[in-house]
Image (tube, coloured by chain):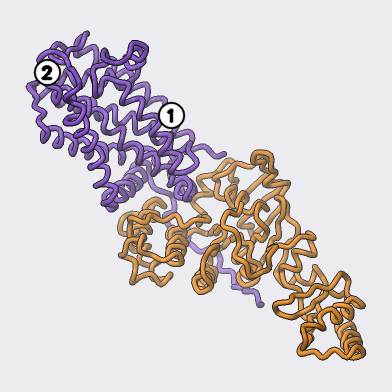
Amino acid sequence: MSTITTPIPTVAAPYVRSRSGASFTVAARATARRTILQFFRTPQVLLLATIQSAFVLFLFRYIFGGAIDTIGPVPYVDFLVPGYLATTFLWNGMSSAAGIAEDSSSGVHDRLRSLPIPRTAVMVGRSLADMALTSWGLLATTLLGFAVGFRTHASPGAVVAAFALILAAGYALTWVFITLGLVARNAQAAQSMAFLLVMPLTFVSSAYVPSHSLPGWMQPVADHQPITPLVNAVRSLMLGGTDAAGLGHTTTYWVAVSLGWWAAITAVFAGLAVSRFARTR
Amino acid sequence: MTPIIEAHGLSKRLGRVRALDDLELVALPGRITALLGPNGAGKTTFVSAVATLLRPDSGELRVAGFDTATEPRRVRQVIGLAGQHASVEPAMTGRENLELVARLFGLDQRASRTAAAEVLERLGLTDTGDRLVRTYSGGMRRRLDLGASLVGRPRLLLLDEPTTGLDPRSRMELWDAIHRLVADGTDVLLTTQYLEEADHLARDVVIIDHGRVIETGTPDQLKDRAGRNVIEVRPRAAGDLVAVEQALAAVATETPRSDIDSQRASAAIDGGAEQLAHVVRLLDERRVTIDDIGLRRPTLDEVFLALTGQSLAPSGPDTEPAADAA
């Protein structure tokens, strides 16, 4: 078979045209847009995620709810919904970890890493997109919460603060899921790892039941993991104080403890994710 | 002329394997260079090093004159990578995928749109450009992926087993697309375990195995250098294959081989026409009727066999290469 010899054009200017590479902002925005399109154009995922989280809410509101003793005058639905709102993004995070692992094993990350862009921007874009999706999910679960009978008597300012805190936690957790996705070998492994993380974090906490109703050995675990202070902070903000929520300490205490946790988690996992993605092995 | 790729003493250990072992390679601009080798030869490792995804343990690697270790960003401005998987986003249209990569290359919105339209046109995807990629066939995805690596107009295109897993027609279409690129002035480094592909596409072929370069040259030079012409005989009766082998053994430099399916026996020889005449006489003496006899140049597979003592595609040149090439 003949070989093809082509005349060598001198390295022509058009080929070098504006290949300087995208700026940090442009790169982050472009990669974020991809993740968001991916999500909204896969309606099955969108629908299933919503149905799944509605299922958890109904399960506790109507099936287990009757058997759970809360404290004092607070109806279980008012106790449950703040905890539920504060933890739903954990469940959504599983698909985020799987998505990252998929991008990693399918060569998407290789292509992105071969482009003249700041590699950090790819991770920041991803985290912002996941954050947007978290906010979207929070909106859906909030509507669900009201639909099953949740009512808040707290000031609008306190409610806004509660949502802000949930989003801050959501952002921190985004980095945890990104890290999991980068470490996992494939999407399924990432999903399983995320599940193993999410299950104990949500159930061994004060999200669905008062932590003092847990077995004695489990209580310290529940009290010293990041979800419990978050749930307690959100609950006391939404119910109008720690007394109404049946919690010790003040609202400020719980907010401060949560903020400490999430700041630390963001710092550690954002660092891990970025350095893992950006390094040249 | 600055080489587009220049590797000296390149080594990389991945776990226990020496994926690259003191590799020396120079690829010149204006042509397609094929990296040919079996699974695990180090082809993908080399491409990853060129694409600045992997840092060699030792040695020097320059792309278009830029050092991959100290000027990775300059290197990334020069290359376009199409890996082994079609890494386009299924939930976006073909056009959106190309525009995304164009944006990342630093083109502004309008220039990205123009570049994407241009690439769709060149790859014959204009009609399907506005469909979601999840509706594309495997061949179309591969072509779009090639497009994504092109949209930034790289000087050097890196194609890692571009046609693995494609049906013959899609493979031909992709080959055509690659040919057109070189005519445009883009340099190409492609890896393949398809001899046919290297033979068809490449001006220069670099045969590698165990992370080292074994031989370099044009397909013709390699065939010359591996030296031996091959006599191939097709007897009328399959039962005569053994007799043919015996006749061939008289002139062959190594044991003749038979292929029952195509009913051919072949053997590498040192000389040329006089050996052919000798074989014809021998067959005549043994009263073997033959349908066809000929002297041909070795295939790249035979070259590889001659150089390494190991066949490139163990189950014959027509087998699909395994997808998990390393």
Q: Tag 1: residue type?
A: Gly
State the image coordinates of residue A93 (x, y, percent, origin top left): 33, 36
Which residue is drawn at the image coordinates 38% and 67% (left, top)? B120
| In-image side of A18 versus A261 (left or right) | right
Chain in orange colour: B
Q: Colour of chain A?
A: purple
Q: Chain of mark 2?
A: A
The residue that label 2 is drawn on is A74
The amino acid at mark 2 is: Val
Question: Quadrant of residue B247 in the image?
Answer: bottom right
Above or below — where is A43 with respect to A189?
below
Residue B7: x %, y % from top left: 67, 50
Q: Residue at x 44, y 58 (%)?
A: B152
Front one among B114 and A275: A275
- Residue drawn at point x = 88 percent, y = 84 percent: B279
Is B85 on the left-hand or right-hand side of A98? right
Which tag is nearer the camera, tag 2 or tag 1?
2
**How far apart in space, not on screen, are marks 2 and 1 (Cα)?**
41 Å
Q: Nearer the viewer, residue A60 or A81?
A: A60
Q: Of label 2 and label 1, which has the lower sequence position? A: 2
Q: Nearer the viewer, residue B300 or B49?
A: B300
Q: Which residue position is annotated with label 1?
A: A271
Residue B156 seen in render: no
At numbered mark 2, what does the secondary structure look like: helix, strand or loop? loop
Residue B207 is left or right of residue B52, and the answer is right
Outermost residue, top side: A249
Specify the quadrant that holds the N terminus of chain B.
Answer: bottom right
